[in-house]
Image (tube, rainbow, N blue to C red):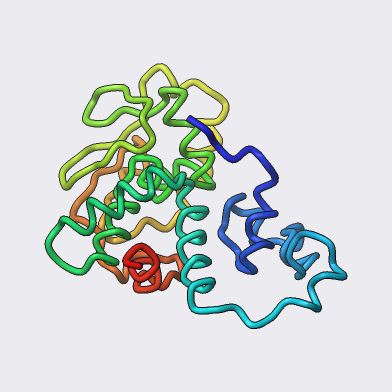
Amino acid sequence: MARYTGPACRLCRRLGEKLMLKGERCTTQKCALERRKMPPGQQRLKRRRKKMSDRGLQLMEKQKARRSYGVLERQFRRHFAEAKRSPGITGENLLRILEMRLDNVVYRLGFADSRRQARQIVCHRHITLNGRRTDIPSCAVKSGDVIAWREGSTGTEYYKMVVERIQDKIVPSWLSLDRENLRGQVLTPPSRSDVDIRLDEKSIVEYYSR
C-alpha cells in the first residue's frame, strides 16, 4: 500500500498546527512549526492567498484527521462509511473507529512516542493482541482486548527504553496499563472527550456529504 514517506514536519506546516507526528520532539524548540510558521512552498505567493472557503476548511479538517492518525484516503473513506452505518452521531463514530485502531492503542498505552512509530512496532510483530502476534496496524480492537509485547521482543534495546519511560506516560481512562509487565487492556470504547486531537468532526461529515 502507498504511504507518505516525505518530511513529517511539512504536514504540520501545511496545516498550521502541531499533529505530534514526531512525539516529544514536537514539544521542543526543534519543532519545525516553531522555527518556521509559514506553510511550505514559495513564500512570495503567500501574500496572494485569499480567505479560505467553507469547502477548504472542511478539507483541512479531513486532512488533519488523516495525517494525525496516519490513514490514507481510501482507508479513511472506509472508516467514514462504517461510521455512517453505525448508530449514533457519525462524526463521533468516526473518531471512535480511528481511536480503536491497534496502532493508535499502542501509542496511547505509551509503547511508542508517535503513531508512526507505533505502526512500525506493530508491522515488525513486536505486539500481541490477545496473545496472538499481529502485523496489521489498522486492526480494530474492542472492549476486553489485551495488548502486550511479544515475549521474544522483551530483550530488545527499544523495549528496555520503553520500560524506563513508561512511568511518566499518561494513559487515557478507557485503557488500563500494567506498567510492570507492559500489558494493556481496552476497558470501554473511547468517548468524544477522550480524543485529545483538536478536530471538528462535523466539518469532516459535511465534506463527505456533498
Decide if residue 44 is on the left or right side of residue 160: right
Above or below, comparing residue 151 to residue 51 in the picture: above
Most distant residue in the front direction: 210
Q: Position of residue 84 (x, y in %)?
A: 21, 59
Decide if residue 73 is on the left or right side of residue 194: right
Please tell me which residue lies in front, 27 or 47.
47
Q: Position of residue 43 (x, y in %)?
A: 85, 67
Q: Quadrant of residue 102?
A: top left
Please tell me which residue lies in front, 39 or 105.
39
Q: Quadrant of residue 185?
A: top left
Most distant residue in the bottom direction: 51
The quadrant of the image that shows the C terminus is bottom left
Residue drawn at (42%, 25%), measured in percent from left and top?
A: 126
Please tell me which residue lies in front, 16 or 35.
16
Q: Position of residue 96 (x, y in %)?
A: 28, 57
Above or below, comparing residue 35 to residue 157 in the picture: below
Above or below, comparing residue 200 to residue 2 in the picture: below
Most distant residue in the top direction: 152
Most distant residue in the left direction: 87
Decide if residue 74 is on the left or right side of residue 67: left
Residue drawn at (30%, 36%), measured in percent from left and top?
A: 139
Q: Position of residue 70 (x, y in %)?
A: 48, 46
Residue drawn at (24%, 65%), measured in percent from left and top?
A: 90
Residue drawn at (55%, 79%), measured in percent from left and top?
A: 53
Give the number of marks.
Answer: 0
